[in-house]
Image (tube, rainbow, N blue to C red):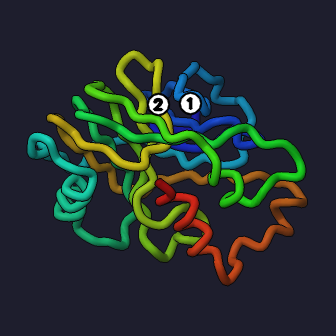
Amino acid sequence: GQGSFGLGTFNGLDGEMIILDGKCWQMRVDGSVRAAELDQRTPFAVVTNFVTNLSAAVEPHSTRDQVSELVDSLTVSPNYLYALRITGTFDWVKTRTVQQQSKPYPRMVDATDNEPTLRFENVSGVVGGFRTPVYEQGISVPGCHVHFIDDDHSIGGHVLDFQIAEGHVELCLGTDLRLSLPRTEAFESANLSPEDLSTELHKTESHN
């Protein structure tokens, strides 16, 4: 086992992955969720052992920005990568999930341009993910990358925005982080630092 908590994607971008309490869940483009095997092939996963270092209650009906401010106020340094778990009842959560792609794979931006955005109302669950320092930008997504899954493990996706009715945040400073990357020729020869990487990532991530 590579740890109890994490995020990733599946081969061919067939949905998104969240790992909670050592269980791996696959979130599909229609917002549905199914249990996945940890050994299902993944091109990208970031996994850690979640140990709560810091926690705080959120103010009722906090926006995503307000929760981000709360999280930032808890952390000792912006240079740490940390895992983040927000548990509670959400007024609404807006998500999208990448669709399975076939070769030749489109650039990430093209792949995310036409996905449906889903909105779940009055739902209890977990928003989980990582807050990465800017210097990590080439490896992961700068800023906050989070996925949502409801308590029944039936709906979820990559979080675009949310408002939380009530709940709490927990942070785990990422000291034992493991990054799994593929060992393939395509990956070895990929240009992971193109001039426009941050623009591309920004389009991919903050796409509404």
Numbered badge on residue 27? 1
- Tell me if label 2 and label 1 are in contact, CB under 8 Å: yes
Residue 126 location, quadrant: top left
83 relative to 140 in the view: left or right: left
Q: Nearer the viewer, residue 81 or 131?
A: 131
Numbered badge on residue 149? none
73 relative to 196 in the view: left or right: left
- Count of numbered tags: 2
Closer to the N terminus: mark 2 or mark 1? 1
Query: Where is 10 relative to 141, above or below?
Result: above
Identify the residue under disc 2: 156
* Badge 1: residue crowd in 10 Å (few <14, some 14–19, many ≥20): many
- Look at label 1 and name its amino acid: Met
Q: Which residue is drawn at 73% across and 38% down?
A: 100
56 relative to 44 in the view: left or right: left
Residue 25 visible here: yes
Q: Which residue is drawn at 61% across and 46% down?
A: 45
Q: Residue at x 86, y 69 (%)?
A: 189
* Badge 2: residue crowd in 10 Å (few <14, some 14–19, many ≥20): many
Q: What element carries label 1?
A: strand
Q: How far apart, in angstroms, are the residues tagged by discs 2 and 1?
A: 6 Å
Query: Where is 196 relative to 130, above or below?
Result: below
Horizontal and vertical percent position of residue 204 = 57, 59
- Look at label 2 and name its amino acid: Gly
Horizontal and vertical percent position of residue 34 = 57, 20
Residue 24 visible here: no
Q: Residue at x 31, y 28 (%)?
A: 121
Q: Which of 50 and 160 is in front in this view?
A: 160
Query: Where is 23 relative to 83, above or below?
Result: above
Horizontal and vertical percent position of residue 139 = 60, 65
Horizontal and vertical percent position of residue 161 = 36, 48
